[in-house]
Amino acid sequence: MGIFKSFAEKLKNTGNRWTQSVSNLFSDDPVTDDFWDELEENLILGDVGIDTIETLIADLKQVMVDRRITNKRELKAAFAELLISRLEAVPGMGKPLDLSRKPSVVIMIGVNGSGKTTTSGKLASQLKAQGRHVIMAAADTFRAAAIEQLKAWGERAGVRVVAQAQDSDPAAVVYDSIMAAKAAGDDVIIADTAGRLHTKSNLMEELSKVTRVIKREIPEGPSEVLIVLDAVTGQNGFMQAETFSKAMPITGVVLTKFDNTSKGGIVIAIADRLKMPIRYVGLGEGIDDLQLFDPRTFVETLLDAGEHE
Ligand SMILES: Nc1nc2c(ncn2[C@@H]2O[C@H](COP(=O)(O)OP(=O)(O)OP(=O)(O)O)[C@@H](O)[C@H]2O)c(=O)[nH]1
């Protein structure tokens, strides 16, 4: 619609240094042994993860033999296809949210500071711009500031926020939001939850209770459960994702702060290790800095970086 910049445009503007160094490896020169060492080193620096790197390099060497590729420029196209197929092998990768139910509940989970509240606000704003009737639930009742922050996003996005006092039961807030959505005929409820991993069992109980309350009102349960992972903390996010997925089946990842990291390879690591689809990428703090993830655009931008400099 022209309001939001395209994913590729935004990605390029982040100037992700990792993407430039990977892209610069593929010159017109012949492929040498040094090339493989440099590629491996770059992928490690980019947070791809060693197991994934080993299989990627083995696959790329095989393609090189099969297609009789001798120079690095040709290898680049093969590498791009390999990365795209790895990403697309994960069901749901880059798929828009399923908001077919009325109301559809979208739950945001993830540790504190990962960007849940910000992402909830950005998402609410975008869905509203697409003509959806959105309501947000301030189910992160652990911190008063989180409730206030969500209310501020609500104002900015022009979206109602259902909230209770600090320390109230998150499930009760979600229940209230479902009632409010049903009464007003809203389409989408975005629930921002708390993510205190140091009290794991409480968190699990809290999230299970939220699910039970939703299922009482909407038997199919939440439409989407999105784990919000900070791209800067990279591989640490995997443990979080594993812990959270025990409390609720996760339907997708939102990768935030991608503009703040030079470790773009985390995208490939998420696909390969977690087998969870990336649905959105956060590329800044502004309201339109949330972009639907598109594997092909991502890889093509990654490997194109630096060429125009
Ligand atoms: N640069 C950048 N900053 C982001 C992005 N997403 C979130 N942030 C920032 O990250 C910080 C934390 O975001 P919050 O939304 O408060 O995180 P949270 O997970 O809700 O954390 P709590 O409120 O503590 O539970 C804020 O300063 C956001 O502006 C992003 O995609 N890019």
Image (tube, grey):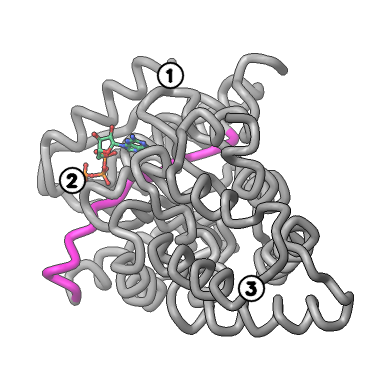
Q: Earlier in the sequence, mark 2 or mark 3?
A: 3
Q: Which residue is mark 3?
A: 32
Q: Which residue is mark 1?
A: 157
Residue 216 visible to the viewer: no
* Residue shown at 31% from the left, 38% from the top: 117
The amino acid type of the residue labelled 2 equals Thr
- Choose the circle earlier in sequence order: 1 or 3: 3
Towards the viewer: 300 or 296: 300
Question: Residue at 64% of width from left, 73% of height from top?
Answer: 32
Q: Which residues are magenta?
A: 187-200
The picture places residue 72, in percent across and down from the top left corner, at 71, 61
Q: Which mark is residue 141?
A: 2
Q: CA distance from mark 2 to mark 3?
A: 57 Å
Q: Secondary structure at mark 2?
A: loop
For marks 2 and 1 on the same chain, the one whose residue lies earlier in the sequence: 2
Callout 2: CB less than 8 Å from ligand 1: no
Q: Quadrant of residue 118?
A: top left
The verdict on residue 197 being magenta is yes
Q: Which quarter shows the C terminus?
A: top right
Question: How far separated are the C-alphas under marks 1 and 3?
Answer: 53 Å
Image quadrant assignment for residue 85: bottom right
Cα–Cα span, label 2 and label 1: 21 Å
- The three-letter amino acid code for the residue at tag 3 is Thr
Asked if residue 165 is among those painted magenta in the image, a careful observer would answer no
